[in-house]
Amino acid sequence: MKVQIRYFASVREALSSSNETVDTRAETLAALRDELIARGGAHAAALARGKAVRMALDQVMSDEAAALHEGCEVAFFPPVTGG
């Protein structure tokens, strides 16, 4: 299925990209993150397990168990603090 991915803040900077469309077999956010990490390089570093990375599915904050669907939008970003 095709999924639109958006990257924000330090994740965007690390990947030198703000978005991409991928064809994935992942069924959940966790599986998609693992696919991206498996690319190696900047993706592995920016999205590594143990790194604080938040995710949203169709502009709603979601946990890793959230199910993907054709044409959905996934966003990856670091936790943000305000002040």
Image: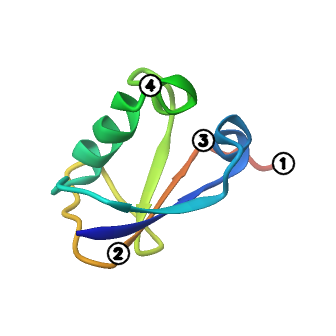
Dot in front, 4 or 2: 4
The earlier-in-sequence mark between 1 and 2 is 2
**Nearer to us in this view, 63 or 39:** 39
Q: Which secondary structure, mark 1?
A: loop
Q: Mark 1: which amino acid?
A: Gly
Left or right of 74? Residue 7 is right
Left or right of 11? Residue 64 is left
Q: Which secondary structure, mark 4?
A: loop
Residue holding disc 3 = 78
Q: Within the image, what quadrant is residue 81 found in?
A: top right
Residue at far right of view: 83
Residue holding disc 2 = 72
Q: Which secondary structure, mark 2?
A: loop
The earlier-in-sequence mark between 3 and 2 is 2
Dot in front, 4 or 1: 4
The earlier-in-sequence mark between 3 and 4 is 4
Residue drawn at (84%, 48%) of the image: 83
Q: Position of residue 30 (x, y in %)?
A: 26, 43
- C-alpha gap between disc 1 and disc 2: 32 Å
Decide: few, some or many residues near mark 4? Use Cα within 10 Å; few <14, some 14-19, many ≥20: few
Dot in front, 3 or 4: 4
The earlier-in-sequence mark between 4 and 1 is 4
Q: Position of residue 49 (x, y in %)?
A: 38, 24
Q: Which secondary structure, mark 3?
A: loop
Q: Position of residue 71 (x, y in %)?
A: 33, 79
Left or right of 49? Residue 11 is right
Residue at far bottom of view: 71
Label pair 1/2, CB-CB below 8 angstroms: no
Q: Mark 3: which amino acid?
A: Pro
Quadrant, the N terminus: bottom left
Q: Mark 4: which amino acid?
A: Gly
- C-alpha gap between disc 4 and disc 2: 24 Å
